[in-house]
Image: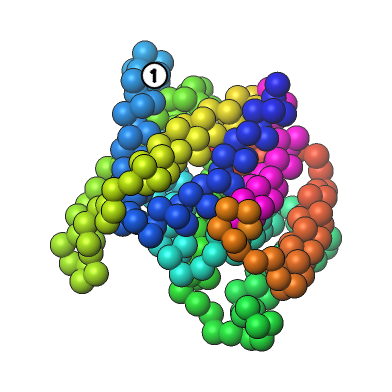
Amino acid sequence: MAYLLLALAAIFWGGNYVVGHILVQYVDPYGLSLIRWGATTALMLALYWRRFSVDFSALRKNLGINTLLSFLGQVSFPLSLYIGLQYTTSLNAAIYISSTPCLVLLINHFIFHERISARNIIGVISSTGGVLYLAFSSSGGNIKTFGLGDVLTIISALSWAFYCAFLRLKDKTVKNTSFVAFSSLIGTIILLPMFLLHAVFAPDYRGVIYTFSPTVIAGILYLIIFPSWLSYVFWNKGVSLIGTTRSEIYTHLIPVSGGIMGIVFLGNELRSYHIITMILIVFGIICCSYRNEPKVSPGVMER
């Protein structure tokens, strides 16, 4: 059951890239993020209010780190992704996120002073090289300028990597459903003034939803129910059953499922530089998976 929950969570997150790419054509990215997390907050508080009220005091005591985690996971990660998807493909964005395990390794080394081996360093170099190769590759196979979409989706991947690394700092006594509900609430509070400033000062602001349609409604519902609610609940349940170390491998299903769905549903073309990039990143991930000592970093990748 744990493996099924982890796989479903990763696949739902992969769908976020495809659905997000479709929705940003019809919905303002700031408005989309606000709707997503505002609705998720309401849903989770309605479902888990009793437990949330019990954990609220502990959540409030750890407000600083919880706010940081909310900014990284509920604000910076999805918002930079949705804006970036206006300028790049969901396939590219999904490939960038695949470098997260190597980024987490680097963050853990420099911030939390975890040991890093020569093999790990090779992995980081390979993974970083793959990301840069993709960012500077054009559809014609030539070197292109670093695009805005590449910058934003890389920021999205970095935000998620920091979120995963810093999860070790959250209060372990708090129920995961309460933590996600609180994170969604804080994220919504942060997003609200950002959205209002964008609505007032952005010259190209056209309203929250440009075009109402069944596709838009279905897409928004998907974001609320699957990658925002079920993925978080499934992932945390799976991690609690088999542990963080064994769960981490399932994060690799996110770029795989997101990339496949982008090719199937959006017509993204798989080119040679995508394959070269994935080879470099996968090699990097394999190298980064080797650790000097088999200890579990609490909270890492607890999505």
- What amino acid is found at the position of numbered circle 1 in the picture? Leu
Which residue is at the far left? 200
Q: Position of residue 241 (x, y in %)?
A: 68, 22
Q: Residue at x 23, y 64 (%)?
A: 205
Number of marks present in the image shown: 1
Q: Is residue 36 visible?
A: no
Q: Position of residue 154 (x, y in %)?
A: 54, 64
Q: Which SS class for mark 1?
A: helix
Q: Is residue 270 visible?
A: yes
Viewport quadrant of the C terminus: top right
Extent of the magenta region: 241-262
Quick check: 291 left or right of 185? right
**Toward which corner of the image does residue 218 lie, by quadrant?**
top left
Q: Position of residue 276 (x, y in %)?
A: 77, 70
Quick check: 211 left or right of 7? left
Q: Position of residue 136 (x, y in %)?
A: 61, 79
Q: Residue at x 75, y 66 (%)?
A: 275
Give above or below for 23 relative to 278.
above
Which residue is at the far top? 50
- Of the pair 280 and 4, the residue shown nearer to us: 4
Dot 1 crowding, Cα within 10 Å, few <14, some 14–19, many 20+: few
Q: Main secondary structure of the magenta part?
A: helix
Viewport quadrant of the N terminus: top right
**Toward which corner of the image does residue 2 lie, by quadrant?**
top right
Which residue has dot 1 on it? 47
